[in-house]
Image: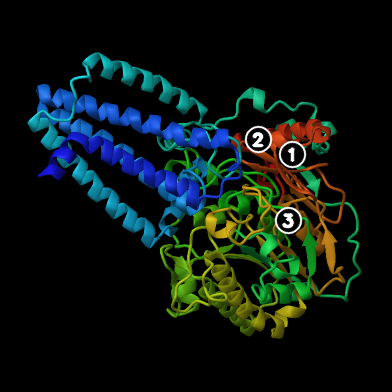
Amino acid sequence: MKLKVALVRRHRLIFFSTIYVVYIVVLFVRCELSDSTSAGHNLVRVVAPLLELGFVGLMCALCLRRAQQGARFAWLALGSVIAGAATSVYFVQTASLYLSNNFITVLALRNTESASFVNSPSLRGLGIITVVGFVIFVYGMVCASASGEGFTQSRSKKWLIASLCGLVVFNLWLLALQRKGSNLEAAFWQVPIASLAHSAFVGWFGHETLGDSQVIDAKGGRCFSYPRRDNSVGESYPFQKTSIYTGALPFAPVGSVGRTEGPNVIVIFTEGISAQLVGIYGGVYPSLTPNIDRLASQSMRVENYFNHTAPTYRGLIGQLSSGYAYADGGGDNGWERGDNRISLGAIHRQTLPRILGLHGYDSYFFSPHVENRPFTLMLRTLGFDRVYTYESIGTGLLRGHFRTRANSGALEDQSLFAGLVEFLRQRAASRDAKPFFLATYNIGTHAFININKDGDVIYGDGSRPFLNKLHNYDVALGEFLNYFYVSRFAKNTILIFTADHAAYPDLMYREVAHKDLKPYFFDRIPLMIYDPIHRLSGTFDARGRNSLDLTPTTLHLLGVSDAPNSFLGRSLFEPRNFLLGIAAEGDTYFLTTPEGVFEQRDVPKRLKSQFDCEIHVVRRFYAAENEDRLFLPLKRLGGS
């Protein structure tokens, strides 16, 4: 009986105090805060959510008071909705902190397909407790409204309204503070409700358009070499040119390889890995990546090479077209939104598979995703002759002998590489002399994914999930390499190993990464080039250059020098186009240097003018993309 009376009188205090305590424990115990030693920042972290929850609590109190005065059901329902919404937000934001060290970001909202990867027993248990707590809260409200309990005489209506108004002003101010820098970690001024409200507005309702002031050239000629005017396209296509590189490849050929024999090209885009964990790049975990290291031992290893964009949609489009893509997978103008797909797919880009197609190559992409995903459509717009998907690999090439990665609906990595091996076996048996270009992308190393206990290979004692999935991927790659090295393709195929972008710095990755890891989506990524056609050096220092240069570098190795294109990058074996490495994630910009990555506000002063100028070049590129003025195809030029 005493418990019921206490619950009726103090149900709001008990309920919101519990939410607050759980949130604070996760924030300070689970998260890795780069400014955790700042007493002022920690004070803000402690006080701000108290005031945010206080506002919600007073809203519920106001609803309860009105329920006691009349229209009981309607006011109780409104109070329950307010409490339920706040509880849900605190749950998802606390869960996000638990998993990723950050509140839900605009990036996360735009990549809603990744939500299925999140599967944690701890979070499911927390969800059950949250639901039970909310039910008890509603019961307390109902009992309080019937008994007239829940308020003391000192709590006058004027006091309630004055407190509520004060908290409204404070929370509006909090909302205005939520826009933050580029760090993928929780900023000290962020609070769950205001942060999610801001991210939702920008991610779902904010129209991302580039204003005129953002595409001003700002004398870009001093920081970027624009092409000479092509009379066939004029000034309408400011990035289009006719050549890809000008200098000879600085490596001697091994021997003469006939066009009918190749060289073929295979590019392996690994989902979200950074170079720092790979053994050959100085990784500290013994035998974590023996097969990647084996490939590196027979390849040219490129060092100080960074991703130029993120996440996957931008990463693949950007690397295969040597440019920047403004739209990503989700969001107001992303590929995952159905009414955008036609307009995004209609943007003309010159790409690596298209150029190679003009030189007699077949082109293929191996994707782990199902056929009807927007991801598949995006790949087709890049000019691949055929995109192999979950269905055509699993039930086609592998005849039903495949596995699906849990919580993703995509092929797991062993099955993807098994499908690639089967494709090459069939190609070898057919004696097809036509050269091919083939690219792959896997799912098993994606952020938030855990490996399966059955059928996957764990690393060590299996206690570190990121190492498990990277090691499991390495084993899958090794099965492909075992076939490749003894096949006829080893003598006439350039094999390139890289990543679509750096590893996302979630907690799985942070617990195994270097302690000086910066919380950005940009880092050094692996690039290894196995080339039986040329005598490449063992290592090559990219000196902060990035994945803008992948396509021009590949074409340089193949000797394809002349083709209309709008590439921003240049071959790694020629002088760079951008004097500084510039990386972009939409409207957020970074500097990539041999010393590491710098976000825009931390760029050294001596480089600031050059960097700002390069930002204007990228924005001008975005504007040309938005107006479909990146590239004028041959058929529109009247060519063959």
> Image check: 528 left or right of 586?
right
How far apart are the two marked residues, 2 and 1, measured between alpha carbons?
9 Å
Residue matched to label 1: 239
Question: Can you tell which mark lies on residue 624?
Answer: 2
Query: Nearest the camera: 31 or 418?
Result: 31
Identify the secondary structure beneath mark 3: helix
Callout 1 secondary element: loop
Question: Mark 2: few, some, or many residues within 10 Å (few <14, many ≥20)?
Answer: some
Task: Please provide percent x and percent y for residue 76.
Answer: 16, 32
Q: Is residue 88 visible?
A: no
User: What's under tag 3, amino acid-wise?
Assistant: Thr
Q: What residue occupies the far front of the structure in this picture?
A: 2
Three-letter residue code for mark 1: Phe
N-terminal of the pair, mark 2 or mark 1, is: 1
Classify the position of the N terminus by image quarter.
Answer: top left
- How many circles with numbers are drawn on the protein? 3
Image marks 2 and 1: residues in contact by CB distance under 8 Å: yes
Residue at the image point whose x is 72% and y is 77% from the top: 294
| 98 is higher (above) or lower (below) than 198 | below
Give the Cα separation between the discs numbered 3 and 1: 16 Å
Q: Earlier in the sequence, mark 3 or mark 1?
A: 1
Q: In which image quadrant can residue 209 be found?
A: top right
Q: Residues within 10 Å of mark 1 (few under 14, many from 20)?
A: many
The residue under label 3 is: 551
* Horizontal relation, residue 393 to residue 631: left or right: left
